[in-house]
Image (cartoon, rainbow, N blue to C red):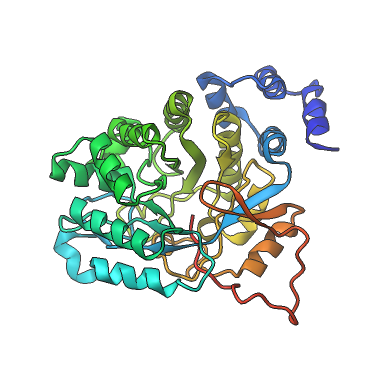
Amino acid sequence: MNATEKLNFLIQDKSLDTGLKQIAQKVLQGERVSFEDGVVLYERGELGYLGVLANYIREKRHGDYTYFNRNFHIEPTNVCVYDCKFCAYSRLIKERDQGWEMDVAGMMDIIRKYDDEPVTEVHITGGVVPKQNLDFYADFFKQCKSHRPDLHIKGLTPVEYYYIFKKAKMSHYDGLKYLQECGLDSMPGGGAEIFHPEVREKIAGDKCTAEQWLDIHEQAHTLGMRTNATMLYGHVEAFWHRVDHMERLRQLQDNTGGFQAFIPLKFRNQGHQMSHVPEVSVVEDLRNYAIARIYMDNFDHIKAYWAMISRDTAQLSLAFGVDDIDGTLDDTTKIYSMAGAEEQHPAMSTRQLVELIKQVDRHPIERDTLYKVVTDYNDIVFDDANKPNYYSLPVIK
C-alpha cells in the first residue's frame, strides 16, 4: 500500500481510539491539528499510528526525496558566559584554560582550507565570550565574503546575537541588518531548547528568553533571511511543554514564513550537570519526529542529525516524517560527541550517505542552504574505477 492507502486503512480501523481517528481524518483532509490534538498524539499515539500519519505528510510534500548538503563547520569558541545545565560542550569563563577562543585570522585559515572543495555553506556557532563581539563577526563576515563570495554564511544563534547586540547597544533588527550587510546570509536554529519558562529556567535560565529568541528570528525573517528552529527534547519537560514550544514556532511561521526546517534535538546525558537524567528511547525519538511532522504543518522540512541519533535511527526516521538527515562529517564538531552522541568521531563520505539513504528506498538529493537541488544522486552509481575526488567533505547542517 502507498502512504495514502495506509492512512485510509488506518482511519477505517474500528478499534482505533475516537480522538486519534479524528486527528487522522484532519491529516487526510489537510486540516491543522490543535494544541489539544498535539498533546493527545504524545499521550496516546502509538509508534505505528504516528508513522502512518507522518509519512503521509512527508510523501505528500517531498515524495521520497531525502536532502543533505555540503558545508563545513567553524566553532569560534567553546568558552561561554552562560551556564546551560545540559551542555557538555562549553566551558565557563572561569574554565577558559580548558577551551579555545579563535581570532578572525584563525577562522579565515579554516575558510581557505576548503578553497578547492565544492562546499556551498559555512556553519558558525559556538560559545559566547565578550571579545567575539559585533565588530569581530562583522570583520569575519566581510573577509569571508571578500575571499569567497559564493559561500553561504549561516552564522550564530539568538543566544550569541542577544549578547552581542545588547553589548553593542543595538536593536535586534539593526544588529542583524548590519551583519547582513557584512555578509551574513542565514541563521541556524540552535538555542531554542524548550521555550516554556517552567523548563527553560531550570535548564538554561541565564540565556536569552523564548521571547527574545523568537524576536531575533522574526527580525531575520523581516530582513529576508531564512532560518531554522530546534527543540531540545527528552529531559525534564512534559509532553505539553513540547507542544507549547512547537505552537510558538508555528505561530511565528504563520506570520513570517521565514523558517525552513524544524530540528528536534535529542537530549544526551553525558559530561554535564544533567547527567542524572535518563535519555529517552529510540521509540520516543521516532514518535517525536513523527509528531513534529504532523504538528509543524507550515514548516517545509523536518531534519534529523544522523551523528546525534546514529545511522540506523536516522534511516528509520525517514519513515517517520524526516526528509533531511544532515550531511557528511569529518569530526570537525564536538557539540554532539561531547554530550554522548552515538557517533563519537562522526565521519561519513558522500557515497556512504547516499547509500544509507538508498538502502531504505529513499531518493538522495544534495541541496544548498536554501534547498535548491545541487546534485540528484538517485541514478549515480559509485564505483572504484571512477571515484569522485570530493567524497570526504565536512558537512554539518
Residue at the far bottom in the pictured view: 385
Rendered location of residue 187, percent (x, y): 39, 46
Q: Is residue 190 left or right of residue 140?
A: right
Rendered location of residue 15, percent (x, y): 77, 23
Tally of numbered tags: 0
29 lies above or below 202: above
In the depicted view, which residue is nearer to us: 184 or 287? 184
Q: Is residue 203 left or right of residue 329?
A: left
Image quarter where the N terminus lies is top right
166 lies above or below 38: below
Residue 153 visible from this viewpoint: yes
Image quadrant where residue 300 sits: top right
Q: Could you tell me which residue is drawn at 46 percent across and 70 percent down?
A: 331
Q: Could you tell me which residue is drawn at 49 percent across and 67 percent down?
A: 394
Image quadrant where residue 45 sits: top right
222 lies above or below 360: above
Residue at the far right in the pictured view: 1
Residue 133 visible from this viewpoint: no
